[in-house]
Image (tube, coloured by chain):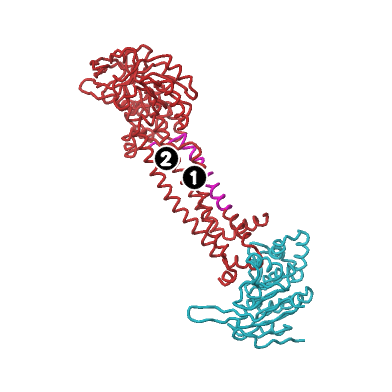
Chain colours: A cyan, B red
Amino acid sequence: MKVLELKDVHKTYNSSEVKVHAVNGVTLDFDEAEFAAIVGPSGSGKTTLLNLIGGLDMPTSGEITIDGTDLSRLKSSQLIDFRMRNIGFVFQSYNLIPVLSAKENVEFIMLLQKWSKEEREKRTFELLKAVGLSDRVNSRPSKMSGGQQQRVAVARALASRPKFVLADEPTANLDSKSAANLLEIMEKLNHEEKVTFIFSTHDARVVKMAHRVITLEDGKVVSDEVRE
Amino acid sequence: MKDEIKIAWRNLWRNKRRTFITAASVFFAVFFAVIMRSYQLGTYDMVINNFIESFSGHLKIQHEKYQDNPLIDYSFEYNDNLAEAISGIESVTSVVPHLESFALVSNGPQSKGAAVIAIDPVMERDFSNPENNLVRYRITPESIVQMKNENVLPAHVIGELEKNTGRAYSSRGRLELELGLPASDNQLYIPPILDNIQVKNGYLEEQDNGVLVSDRLAGFLKVSLGDTVILMGQGYRGVSAAGIFAVRGIIKMPSPDIDNRLIIMTIPTAQEFFGCEGMITSLAVNLTGRSNRTIRTAQEGINSLLSGGSTVARTWYELNPVLYQQIQGDSQSGAAMLGLLYFIIFFGIFGTVLMMIAERKREFGVLVAIGMQKGRLKRILSIEMLFLGIMGLAAGLMASMPLILYFNHYPIVLKGDLAKMMEDYGWDAVMPTAPVGPYFYMQAAVVAIMVIIATIYPLRKIGRLKEIEALRS
């Protein structure tokens, strides 16, 4: 079942002197529970493509459909709401809410979706346990290591049972042990939660674990390899 | 909402220094604005009260031409029925007759133009009550020598007394105020001081043919109790008025201008002196309050009683337009200063708000990216600003209130050139604060509005926030 489809997507930035084609005619689709990596050299358009998929930016042309909904047809507030219900984000620099504890950060999206207190608590403890942080529920981000913060970010991204999680270079700021630990957790959750993970990366370890590797160069897909 | 309040509250304490700076901007804005306005209004109040209590009253009934041409020729016959009818008007508390004119007062080679006010000594007790202002204490060089000899006062108290040599006081409170000694010193040293500086004085009997002389005028004329003064002037319809009068008492008027030139006598004595039997120049009316509405309503009521005659009721500010304009002018320059203060402080608050927004742009981008509606984000930011505003406002009001109350009871007594300048204006050289009133809350409201205006910009920024740009910042 297709959760995400991109049809001839272009993104062009008009600087004062030149036009930059950051994404140049990308057509892709993703099934449920994929574990896909987007790779390519710096400036190849990985982050731009993730931003377009996440509805954080709009394509210059082409169509992005998530579960049958064309993102370009949504108004700003509808798009925010749509993102909240369908897409989880994991950022390179974690971006947790600094004034909230690990538990509150994970709960936050569910709170926005008006889940009941019992449901929220059940899901939060389930996810924090899954990412190995059941002993740090009340810690604020400033009291946690980078690896721990990124694990909270993964739990937060999965909290509202999204269709897929977008992770932009999730291991870039982590040491090798924390990175390996995070990847194991993400892969486990991919299986358990049946959620599609799409991540941009330079990290060979991430590429090695991915079930599908899409390579971008100059904004174009140059290879799309599915591994068994 | 509960969660928004929780996040907003925690956000405040993420950067304690910034929170304190912003709250301090609000605090100082409220504190200085309230104190400044309180001193201004307190001083105006004192000046107006001095004027009103110095025989003017809130309203005065005069011959219609008396205001432009204050001659005794424009006096009118005093009628008990009229006074009774006026007393029946709502908000009127007292009505007393006055006969006012001018005369040259002299003693030996000293002479000076003086205002002569004739009163009913008994009725006046319920009005300006000049008996309250009789000089009861006077610091003289002789009394200081005596106190030094008695050796009961420490050097710093003697020093204060020496600084105030020649000054007269109508009450112990006024003496304490002007000496400015600490409360513990007052308790210990004021009784022996009073014993040494007490002076004899007297008031007018109902049919008295003597006069009361204001303290500064008495000093100029070098007269004291039991001496006589000669008065010369023009009486009713051009008759010459001359007489010799015994000094029954020395009176200390709060307004230095009036204290320099006042003679008080009884109405029958003045009528005889000026040759205007049965006539008075004014009926002074005191009211329950000084609001414009009270004064105007009473004025209309009195004027309807007087219609058809040659007399009219005038308000205190119509009677003294110069004082009124002085106050208005000073109030406007004070308002301009307040405006400047607000302007500076507004940009202080606005600057810290901008800093806060710039620091958190990326965070706002993340929140919107993961699904927080901009409206909700705006609410959180508004609550943060509300907390900051409330903290600053509450602290500002709480810090200024005790000061206002204290200086309302114990006004600052000005000394030196500033005191002289105020006395030259005809004002008493003290600076009281106004009691807590609408102005107090008004300043707080203005600062609250400033905080709201300072919040509009960040809210607009959030409304126009582009997630992708915020995340890149």
Q: Which residue is mark 1?
A: B443
Neighbours of disc 1 within 10 Å: few (<14), some (14-19), many (20+): many
Q: Nearer the viewer, residue B295 or A150?
A: B295
What x and y, as percent, mark residue B153? 39, 31
Label 1, label 2: how many angstroms apart (C-alpha)? Answer: 13 Å
Q: Which residue is mark 2?
A: B40
Q: Are marks 1 and 2 on the same chain?
A: yes
In this rendering, does residue A172 appear at all? Answer: yes
User: Is B169 in the magenta?
Assistant: no
What x and y, as percent, mark residue A32? 76, 77
Which amino acid is tagged 2? Gln
Whether label 1 touches label 2, CB < 8 Å? no
- Chain to which the residue tagged by mark 2 belongs: B
What x and y, as percent, mark residue B271? 31, 14
Based on the displayed image, in which of its 4 quarters is residue B57 positioned? top left
Segment tinted magenta in the rendering: B386-413
For the point 23% across and 23% down, the residue is B111
Q: Nearer the viewer, residue B80 or B223?
A: B80
Secondary structure mostly seen in the magenta stretch = helix
Secondary-structure class at tag 1: helix
In what quadrant of the picture does the N terminus of chain B appear? Answer: bottom right
B246 w.r.t. A11: above or below: above
Secondary-structure class at tag 2: helix
Q: Nearer the viewer, residue B330 or B276?
A: B276
